[in-house]
Amino acid sequence: MCYAFIKKILFCLDPERAHHVTLKTLNLAQKLRLTQLLPSVAHSPRTVMGLQFSNPIGLAAGLDKNGEYIDALAALGFGFIEVGTITPRPQPGNLLPRLFRLPEQEAIINRMGFNNKGVDYLVEQLKKTKFTGILGVNIGKNKDTSIENAVTDYVHVLRRVISFASYITINISSPNTENLRQLQHGELLKNLLNTLKAEQAMFSTNTNKYVPLVVKISPDLTQDELAQMCQIFLAEKIDGVIATNTTVSRDGVELSPFATEMGGLSGKPLMMRSTEVIKQLRVLLNNQIPIIACGGISSAEDAQEKIAAGANLIQIYTSLIYQGPRLVRDISKKCPV
């Protein structure tokens, strides 16, 4: 009831402004210990990728790009939090407007373009956080770095954040950075993953800490493209796959006044396609690599469907905007252990 009122106010604001207002308000509430009044989240521990999760519900990357609100977001009861996408150098992202609500479909279209304050800023935030749970860092390349030189950007960010991260997500599937999705294919993908796995191994040898590498993939891949990717994931011993990022499809939102806006679509319309990708992954990966479901989860039943399809963990973002923090509790009560 309370969030329904808050949402009405927030939805009167520009979406990007509402985003910042929400995070700053949540941060203040956490400092005043008002977040202790939120409904408790059921404890449902599980071990995935060698990491111990208190529950299977994670916050997807994109909400807290610069790691400024980790402690406040942790108060919502997430089993894990993923920050980013972060790039080597700060960048403003794409031109405004770049974020659009589709309330009738409980969806969002964004073309943010990896707007962030850069990896050095993120590291300073990670040094300050008191959060002791599972923290993922989502990494990408700067817009003006060519695809041929992209591996250099990923290596730079990985080296800076690996000592702070529980796991690292390699984002090669955002539709909002030109040509980025080329990294999902062939020699470009092999070279990127092989190089990052070598960095992972070197860090593990030097510190005796193993930090899993996860790849976030597109929902717009063909079956053949997905099969080829999975062969590379298995060969390179990738630790996890997030399925999926946003889609360039407009299925299910054709009647929205924003349907023609460029960018990635998230929310309820992505549910079916994301689940189908998970089912394919389970077969193609032969249950050898864990799957994190992301895309269209807006209820406990949706979460159960993702797990039944083959997911080990789930992530939410868009549904949190439409339904509020109570959704985390509702899902946690019904997710199987």
Image: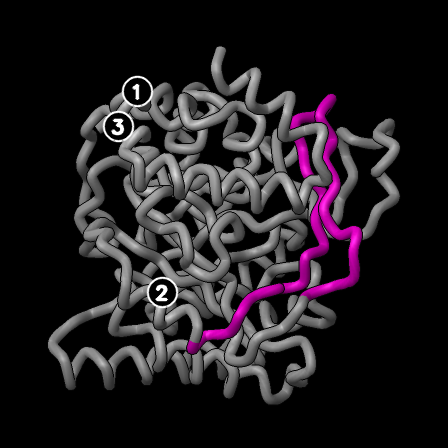
| Residue drawn at (35%, 71%) of the image | 124
Q: Quadrant of the C terminus?
A: top left
58 above or below 208? Answer: above
Instruction: Name the foreground residue: 153 vs 250.
Output: 153
Disc 3 and disc 1 in contact, CB within 8 angstroms: no
* Secondary structure type for disc 1: loop
Find residue 57 and report its horizontal and vertical position in percent.
35, 36
Residue at image mark 2: 125
Residue type at mark 1? Answer: Pro
The stretch in magenta equals: 93-120
Tell me residue 137's x, y (percent).
39, 62
Residue 268 picture quarter: top right
CA separation, marks 2 and 1? Answer: 27 Å
Residue indicated by mark 1: 39
Q: Earlier in the sequence, mark 3 or mark 2?
A: 3
Q: Which mark is residue 36?
A: 3
Residue at screen point 67% across, 76% down: 143
Q: Nearer the viewer, residue 37 or 77?
A: 37
